[in-house]
Amino acid sequence: MPTFLNRGVEWLLEGGWVQQPANPGLVPGRRRPPPRQRGTPPAPPEEQDSDDQRLDVTLNCDIGLVRSLQLIDEFVDRERWPEVVASLQQVLDGHTGSADSFLKDNEGQWVSLQDHAQRRIRSLPESGLRLYQQVYGPVAEQLLDQGRRTGEMDRLVDVARRYLNTAAGETAALEIATMFIDRGQPFAAVRWYERVSDERLQNASPRMRIEYAEALRQVGRRADAHRQLARVLSDPNLASTDATIARSLSVELRDDAVPERAVPKEQTDWPMVRGNATHSGIARTGHPLLKQKWGVSLSNIPAVEDQLRDVHVDLVDSGRACVPALSAVSEGGLTAVRTLHGVEVYDLASGRLVWGDVGDHASPDRLLSGIIEGDGEQLAARHNVASQARYQDLGDADQHPLASLLYRDFVSGSLSTDGRQLFVVSQLAVLGRAGNNYTFGNQDAARDPFDRDWSTSTIKSYDLATGSVRWEVGGRRTGEPFERPLAGVYFFGPPTVADDELYAVGELENQVLLIVMERLTGRPVWVQPLANAESPIDVDLTRRLWSCAPVVAEGMVFCPTTTGWLVAVDRLERRMVWAYSCHQGAPEKARMRFGGATVVPLQSLNSRWTSSPPMVSGPYLIVAPDELPDAMGAQEPYVACLDRTTGREIWRRPKEDDGLYVAGLTDSAVLVVGAHRFRALSLERGEELWTRTLPVDVKPSGRGLQSGSSYLLPLSSGELWNIDLKDGELRETLRTPSGARPLGSLAVSQEGLLSADHLGLRCFPDRESLQAEIAHRMASDSGDPWSAVRAAEIRYLQGDANAALQRLRTVTEQQLQSSTSGDVVADHQRLLREVLVTVVSEDFQQGEEAYSQLLSSVDHRTDLEIHRLAIERALARKEFAEAWSLLWPPIAGGQADSRLTRGEVTLSVAAWERGRLAELYALSPDEVRSQMDQALAAAAADGSKTIEDRK
């Protein structure tokens, strides 16, 4: 598509809902264009010259301005300095509002158009630079004085951004750098120091230059810090106090092998994706007790819950690792989650529903349940759409829309909060047609029976405590004077909260935008075009699932785009800094084409990274692009480490077959969770530091949680591994009670651990609170049976079944019968059975006493789990005759098949018995095999089955 701004975005920037800059720049205001016809592909690209600027049309590049800059060379050759400086200053004053764009420099690198203009001014011959400073120096001085009087950072930034090549502009840049030093943000400070010429920097005060050296040390640039300090110490007029400080810092530089990196503050709330605006949140958890405190369902309709279970089971049976797209946020005493019928907020202490906003007539709950409203032909058409959304066990769970909603759609599954407001992507059309991207199916709003607009969505702000709507932006474009701000935009997820601003990535008419809004009102403050998409978002059904949560860190915003580009934007200057392409060095992207449009193929689950937004740690930015692999397999997914300042790639490692998601960062490692292992890669070099292999047939069941110096990894076996991040050693294995489903994706809250999965949200308390209650009760009654059962349960859920069994055996029958504490007898029986099963299973060669106690308390002939356990124990102990006596009776009796669930795997008992029978026949000695032959022959003689059938 054309690489200049489309008309819809121009309207946003020039005359729409975005605040105007002081100088509107080159482009005059225009009337707002009519909305594009939805459901139709964009116009074909315009023919352009063989210009290097169009080598990658997916990056935002204003061809008109690029060509204007090229004409400046002619003015320079003729020494027409008034035209030169006026043209360059117009770029800095802001073309099309405040939006910057990219161009390729002489070295083939994509650079900011405004940065390029600043460098062109600085490189002018003396006569040209002198004229520039004479014309614009007084203006810059006046603006600098105004900024100092008002104390407004924005005014200082405006002077530095527009007039950097004047004395006032460089002074403003140094003052901004000092402000960042005071805030403890060395990366931002270094960036502003380096905007200043070396001559001006060396004329700054010694204290300022020492602060610059300290900032260089903190960001890891030790050699540069040494050079800066040497220049300071060589100053003959250096004051003794400053000299002492400089020498002390010089000693620190010699002694420090590696500068310490700031460690994120541990959090007891989880307000957004990955915990905070840098996506590097670290939770402060207690010791989780995997005994559910409360839980809520995604749907209260049994038929819908059956579909959720069925699609999950089918995915697991096909070998997929199912990492839920759903996630919860928590703040204070509340947690929020999106269910299938709307957004709901719960009280963390009790699980009580505080408020809920019911979805529209096309909510997932209604589509999956078939509870559809309408009349005549409209009703029939709506039922047809709903039937495509329902999971009906058609054998291809991976490509089904419901599988995408549960495990790929991180736009729908994500929320964010600032503690007072809850931010939600709303009016979001979901459950489209099956995976391989049917173009122009039910995505055209004019033909969608539910009148859903697949090209737009909204961001809605709720009062977190009450549920009242505070504001809403986006939504369908109507052409009316009073339509919402940002109408026509499709949002790639809820906004990232940073101070008083919200940062979101959206798309309007194929152009991907960074949109910055006021936090309290939602009013757009500024919009920066980033890249151009090859297909409309209402057609490209896979791309609309990818969440693009911007990273906000020390004055920079790092923006995924869904187009293959990651773009860095200066938060204060509102200027492009660098762009990184995940397709660097790869063949032209291969995409699937339908009806003239190019769309991203869905790919099988686990082929791509499970939404892993960029993360910042010190000088590094870790990326795992959603866009890979491409359709033809020309480029495979990878994880890469970039220099956060320049966007330069430092290293990359392939995702490999089992890679699932990038889990987090330590001060030295990148954590990667795979389907079969958990590994740490060196943050600086990318080589593997350690690996923790998962058990056979066990996969991660959700996104884990970095907690202090450990990582909590939920597994499909129902266990929660607590892994030491220094060496990958397993600190602790926690387990869920028997029959409970495995944990999903985790978040922390003030009331314990939150787990979101395909069925709902659950809360698990810290064990410290329960231990305190046990201690209180035991203080008044040392023989309290309730306390004994709870203490045993804690030991069992911590992974110590033998200790739990010993504690349970101390409880007498008399104590149980005399207890007045609820169902303590039933709890004791349930827990005793579960603990005995675990003790026996952990070591079949031991545990005689436990096995005898288990058989005395249950009938293994009717209890399927115990029957299976007895057979496995006999086979493991090579007690083949015993195994035959257990296996044959139910098979010979023609017992009806049944199902048995083990973790996330559901077994057919009949199939399992046949497998064990074949194993037993192969392993048994002759005398046992002879008994088996005789039994099989006798069974065949009754005419009901052949020997082969029995075998």
Image (cartoon, rainbow, N blue to C red):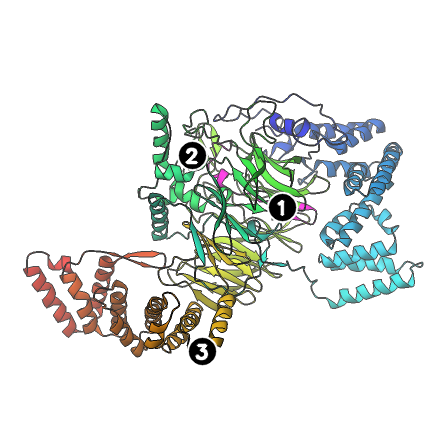
Tag of residue 782: 3
Residue 10 lies in quadrant: top right
Mark 3 belongs to which amino acid?
A: Ser
Q: Nearer the viewer, residue 236 or 431?
A: 431
Q: Which residues are magenta?
A: 536-556
**First along the sequence among labels 1 and 3:** 1
Q: Nearer the viewer, residue 890 or 433?
A: 890
**First along the sequence among labels 2 and 3:** 2
Q: Which residue bears the numbered disc 1?
A: 497
Q: Nearer the viewer, residue 720 or 460?
A: 460
Q: Residue at x 12, y 67 (%)?
A: 933
Residue 888 lies in quadrant: bottom left
Mark 2 belongs to which amino acid?
A: Ala
Q: Residue at x 28, y 68 (%)?
A: 869
The picture places residue 351, in percent across and down from the top left corner, at 47, 53
Tag of residue 362: 2
Quadrant (top left, top right, bottom left, bottom right) of the C terminus: bottom left
| Relative vertical location of residue 214 with respect to residue 396 in this rendering, above or below | below
